[in-house]
Amino acid sequence: MNPFLKQAQKPAVELKKFIEENSRSTLKYKGDKGVKHLLYVPYVVDHDENGNEIKKTVSMRLGLHRLSSSDGKYAGEVMCMNGLIVNDSEGKPLTDGSCAYCERVKDAVEIKSMRYAAEEKRTNSLARAQGWGETALKKKLSDENSRLNGEMKTSGLVEYNYALVVQFILTKHGDLTVGPDGIPEFSLRVWRLSPFVASEISSQFANVRAEFEGNEIIISYTDTEDKMQLALNRTITPVPNEQKRIVNNEKIMEAINAAVEAFDWSEAERAFPELKGEATQVSRNKMDEAFKVWDQYIEEKKKNPNAVYAEYGILTEVVNPSLGGAVVGQAPALGAPVGQEVGGIQMPNMHGIQMPNIGSIPNGVPAGGIPSMGSPIPDAGAFFQNGGGSNVGNPPAI
């Protein structure tokens, strides 16, 4: 197990406690179109503060930050490095206990707030011009808020539970596939449970007074290629005691326990890139680059209170550059002073007379103008999102 993963993982916990605290390879568990999966959830026995035995999943918990690029696209997830002291093989420090992603969340939130304020102003103007009703306006603003949350350069911390599960190979009729040794064939999988998914499971199991740990479960998926719909429309059901085929079979349980005991968590790194971890300086360089325009804006504002942050193409204030309002991070065409022509075809001067330009914009684009936002990215964020643990802008773990 790499030193980052070893330091970052937390002790296994009950599914219920995990919920309370958080209300690329075949190893990763994922859903399939129109099928049913039979899973068994291995567990370890521990004791609570009163000495009572409790079951815990064979799992590890990690805090993650979700990243987005400056154009709002999903850029992966990274392990939170806060409090982690990791050395390389020669004993040299790789991390110092700080987390550059945590440190930049405040900046990311400020940028998002600026963008939302500008979008709110634009949307209200559009609503008045087109006669939208209050319900339509509220929905549009809610959608924009979700989209902008998903486009934050770094998100706040979200904890995930990576649980080891046993997936059995079934025939098309739902029967167990038995190997030459007479034992049903199975594979170990790691199921990434966000707080949202964990809560979903807990509710379904509580309704039938069953435990997740040590149980057999059936997960049914709808007949769709859409990954989001696979996750949203699946059903997770505990197998009734009289229908259980695994836990009451001593041979199967011996094979499962042996496989679980031998499982090496370092294998999960190939399935989940976010488990790799990185040196403090690497993460700090990434964040400095991501927030470069923002940092320039903050410095400019110290000298010039009329400075404007416009990295995303939406000006946060209406400022005329000729009056001293420096625009930081704005595309060149948007900063054209009033009176300057932009675009079009330059026509010649004929006999001392300047012919008009074709396709020109006579007065340019005002410094306070608001360009089109373009098509919003799909909001996969309601999933967990990001705080309730969802993968905003990223299909949920299924």
Image: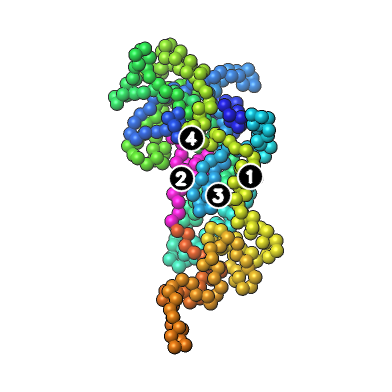
Q: Is label 1 in contact with label 2 (beta carbons under 8 Å)?
A: no
Which residue, given by chain and number where applicable, does mark 2 sit on? 380
The first of marks 1 and 2 along the sequence is: 1
Question: CA gap, disc 3 to disc 1?
Answer: 17 Å
* Residue 341 pos. (x, y %): 50, 75
Which residue, given by chain and number where applicable, does mark 4 sit on? 197
Q: Give the magenta part as a residue range.
A: 375-398
The first of marks 3 and 1 along the sequence is: 3
Few, some or many C-alpha atoms within 10 Å of disc 2 (few <14, some 14-19, many ≥20)?
A: many
What amino acid is at disc 3?
A: Met
> Can you say which quadrant of the picture contains the C terminus?
top left
296 or 366: nearer the eye? 296
Nearer to us of marks 4 and 2 is 2
- The residue drawn where x is 53% and y is 58% is 312
Which residue, given by chain and number where applicable, does mark 1 sit on? 284
Which residue, given by chain and number where applicable, does mark 3 sit on? 152
Main secondary structure type of the part rendered in magenta: loop
Question: CA gap, disc 2 to disc 3?
Answer: 14 Å
